[in-house]
C-alpha cells in the first residue's frame, strides 16, 4: 500500500532565481504550495543572495543562512510564522470543508482572499462593474448609463478612501460588508462634500442598489440588509411652482397645471 494522500498541503520556501545566477544580486524568497501537480507561489517580500539561502534548512522548508547578517534569525522567524499560519488555515478549512481543498482555494489563501465568506471575498466595486458590463453587453442599458455607472463607482471608491471605510484595502470593500449605514454615509458625503443634489445622488445609487439586490439573490448579502438598502433612495418632493399654492383636493388651477406639465417634461425619473 502506498502512502495515503495528505488532505491539505504544507508550505515551504524557495528562492526564485534565474537559470544563471548573479552572485551579487538578491532574489525573492517565495512561499510555495504544491497540490495536484500545480505549484502556487507568493513572494514573501524578503530578498537574499543565493549564497545566503539554504534550501535544505529547517527540514527542507528553507532558511536564511547566518552569512546574511544579524537579521537572519528574525527573518527566519518571520518566514516560519507565515508558513505555519497558512498551514493552520488550510487545516482548518479542510475540517470545515472536507475534501474540498483545490488549487483555487490555496491561491485564495495566498492572496489573503477569504474564500469561506458568503461573498467569497468579492470586491463590491468589481461586482457592480461586472453587472454593468453584463447589462450593457445584453443591451439592457445604454452606453450613457454604462459609462455613468463606471463613473459613479470611481466616486464610490474615492468615498471609501476618504472616509477610511475600506475593509481590506483603503478604497476596497467586500460585497458582504455593504450596509445601510455605509450607504447612508455615502449619501451624506456626496451631499456635503461633493455638493451633489438629490437627483444626482439617486443616479449614483442606482447601480449600487441593483447590484445589492442581485447579491442578495446569490446569498452574498442578507435579504433583510438588502431590503433596508433598497429603501435608501432619496424621495424628493416635486415643486409645482416657486410659490406653491395648497391643493384643495378637487382641481388644479391653470397655473398649477402649467407648472405640473413643465415638471413632467423636465423630470428625468420615469417612475415619477
Image (tube, rainbow, N blue to C red):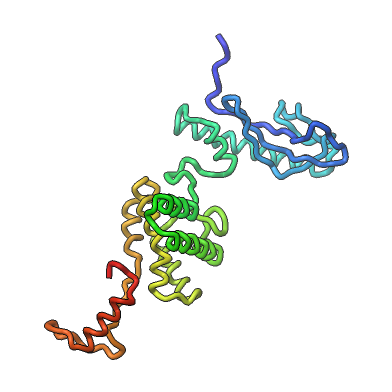
Q: Position of residue 165 (x, y in %)?
A: 51, 61
User: Please, which residue is most extreme toward the left here?
Assistant: 250
- Report the side of 252 relative to 173 (left or right): left
User: Please, which residue is most extreme toward the bottom here?
Assistant: 243
Residue name at image x 48 percent, y 48 percent: 122
Q: Position of residue 132 (x, y in %)?
A: 44, 54
| Picture layout, residue 192 above or below residue 86 | below
Task: Pick the quarter of the image with the C terminus.
Answer: bottom left
237 or 150: nearer the viewer: 150
143 or 23: nearer the viewer: 143
| Picture layout, residue 268 above or below residue 48 | below
Q: Position of residue 65 (x, y in %)?
A: 81, 35
| Picture layout, residue 205 above or below residue 213 | below
- Report the side of 26 relative to 176 (left or right): right
Q: Quadrant of residue 180?
A: bottom left
Residue name at image x 59 percent, y 40 percent: 110
Amino acid at each position: 500500500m502506498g502512502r495515503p494522500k495528505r488532505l491539505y498541503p504544507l508550505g515551504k520556501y524557495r528562492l526564485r532565481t534565474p537559470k544563471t545566477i548573479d552572485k551579487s544580486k538578491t532574489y525573492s524568497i517565495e512561499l510555495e504550495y504544491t497540490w495536484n501537480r500545480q505549484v502556487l507561489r507568493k513572494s514573501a517580500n524578503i530578498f537574499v543572495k543565493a549564497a545566503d539561502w539554504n534550501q535544505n534548512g529547517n527540514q527542507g522548508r528553507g532558511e536564511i543562512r547566518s552569512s546574511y547578517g544579524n537579521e537572519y534569525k528574525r527573518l527566519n522567524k518571520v518566514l516560519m510564522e507565515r508558513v505555519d499560519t497558512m498551514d493552520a488555515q488550510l487545516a482548518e478549512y479542510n475540517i470545515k470543508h472536507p475534501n474540498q481543498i483545490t488549487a483555487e482555494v490555496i491561491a485564495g489563501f495566498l492572496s489573503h482572499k477569504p474564500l469561506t465568506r458568503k461573498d467569497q471575498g468579492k470586491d463590491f466595486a468589481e461586482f457592480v462593474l461586472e453587472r454593468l458590463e453584463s447589462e450593457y453587453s445584453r443591451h439592457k442599458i445604454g452606453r450613457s448609463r454604462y459609462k455613468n455607472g463606471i463613473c459613479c463607482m470611481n466616486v464610490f471608491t474615492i468615498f471609501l478612501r476618504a472616509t477610511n471605510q475600506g475593509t481590506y484595502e483603503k478604497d476596497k470593500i467586500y460585497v458582504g460588508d455593504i450596509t445601510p449605514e455605509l450607504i447612508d454615509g455615502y449619501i451624506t458625503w456626496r451631499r456635503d462634500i461633493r455638493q451633489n443634489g438629490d437627483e444626482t445622488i439617486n443616479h449614483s445609487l442606482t447601480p449600487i442598489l441593483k447590484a445589492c439586490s442581485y447579491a442578495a439573490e446569490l446569498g452574498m448579502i442578507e435579504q433583510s440588509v438588502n431590503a433596508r438598502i433598497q429603501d435608501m433612495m432619496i424621495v424628493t418632493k416635486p415643486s409645482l411652482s416657486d410659490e406653491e399654492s395648497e391643493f384643495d383636493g378637487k382641481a388644479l388651477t391653470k397655473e398649477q397645471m402649467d407648472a405640473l406639465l413643465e415638471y413632467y417634461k423636465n423630470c428625468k425619473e420615469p417612475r415619477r
